[in-house]
């Protein structure tokens, strides 16, 4: 019985990693152009239309330039986020939210923060993505691999982890909010949908 339970838990954890990877892949491919527009606004101070015009002028061939780092980062980070959160939660003896239980627990918060901190190990990919999205580096870096080599060669490994403390804080805090609010909001929406469906049938 214990062996069966352990096997079920391993399969469940593996499924969490797989679902996280798939979600990260779909999310990145869909929102990447919007992310690029947002980045240009932050760097150059453009409004939305100005950023879109600049990206359109560069051509469709450069629209997905720099996609590989965020694709690797998001798929891996989502797999890490969902998979490790579940493992950490089990380790801390916590339980997932159920109807009527506490909205926030220390165990869920600790598990979420640690999962976010582990995600921060992927910061080098985020750094490469930022450089490849900047138009002034279009001619300096050929691709993701070239950028990774040149950053290490000229600036050292510390450059990959510039701002790591903010990344850890961002990931940890956002994970705490996400994992503590995800289930309550999901149940609220499902309950509301059931009520509306029932009302419509009457």
Image: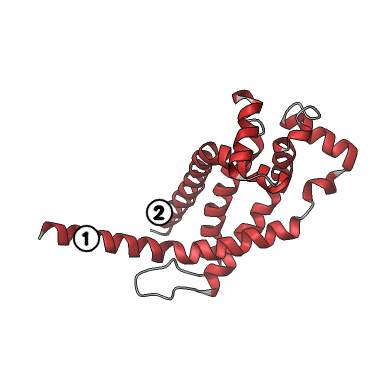
- For the question of whether residue 72 can be seen, the reply is no
- Secondary structure category for the residue under label 1: helix
What residue would you read off at disc 2?
4
Q: Who's the residue at 53% across and 41% down the image?
A: 31
- For the question of whether residue 41 can be seen, the reply is yes
Q: Who's the residue at 59% across and 68% down the image?
A: 110
Q: Quadrant of residue 67?
A: top right
Within 10 Å of disc 1 (Cα), the crowding (few <14, some 14-19, many 20+) is few
- Secondary structure category for the residue under label 2: helix
Q: In x, y percent, where is residue 20?
A: 50, 47
Task: Locate residue 198 relative to residue 31 in the image: left or right.
Answer: left
- Front residue (pair 186, 113): 186
Task: Locate residue 186 relative to residue 129 in the image: left or right.
Answer: left
Task: Locate residue 118 relative to residue 21 in the image: left or right.
Answer: right
Q: For residue 156, which numbered disc appears in the image?
A: none
Mark in front: 2 vs 1:
1
Q: Say which quadrant the C terminus sits in.
A: bottom left
What residue would you read off at disc 1?
196
Q: How many marks?
A: 2
Q: Is residue 154 above or below residue 100?
A: above
Q: In x, y percent, where is residue 164?
A: 75, 55
* Mark sitting earlier along the chain (2/1): 2
Q: Who's the residue at 37% across and 68% down the image?
A: 98
Task: Locate residue 94 relative to residue 46 in the image: left or right.
Answer: left
CA gap, disc 2 to disc 1?
A: 41 Å
Within 10 Å of disc 2 (Cα), the crowding (few <14, some 14-19, many 20+) is few
- Front residue (pair 153, 132): 132
Q: Say which quadrant the N terminus sits in.
A: bottom left
Q: Is residue 154 above or below residue 10?
A: above
Q: Who's the residue at 49% across and 39% down the image?
A: 26
């Amino acid at each position: 019985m214990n062996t069966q339970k352990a096997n079920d838990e391993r399969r469940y954890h593996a499924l969490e990693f797989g679902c996280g990877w798939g979600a990260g892949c779909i999310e990145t491919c869909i929102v990447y152009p919007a992310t690029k527009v947002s980045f240009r606004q932050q760097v150059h101070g453009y409004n939305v239309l100005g950023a879109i015009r600049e990206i359109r002028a560069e051509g469709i061939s450069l629209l997905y330039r720099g996609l590989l780092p965020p694709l690797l980062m998001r798929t891996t980070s989502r797999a890490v986020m969902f998979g490790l959160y579940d493992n950490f939660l089990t380790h801390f003896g916590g339980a997932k939210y159920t109807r009527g239980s506490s909205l926030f627990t220390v165990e869920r918060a600790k598990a979420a923060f640690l999962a976010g901190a582990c995600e921060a190990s992927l910061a080098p990919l985020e750094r490469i993505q930022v450089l490849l999205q900047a138009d002034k580096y279009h001619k300096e870096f050929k691709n993701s691999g070239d950028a990774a080599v040149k950053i290490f060669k000229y600036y050292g490994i510390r450059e990959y982890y510039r701002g790591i403390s903010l990344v850890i804080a961002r990931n940890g805090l956002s994970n705490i909010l996400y994992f503590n609010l995800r289930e309550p909001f999901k149940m609220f929406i499902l309950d509301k949908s059931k009520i509306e469906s029932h009302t419509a049938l009457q």
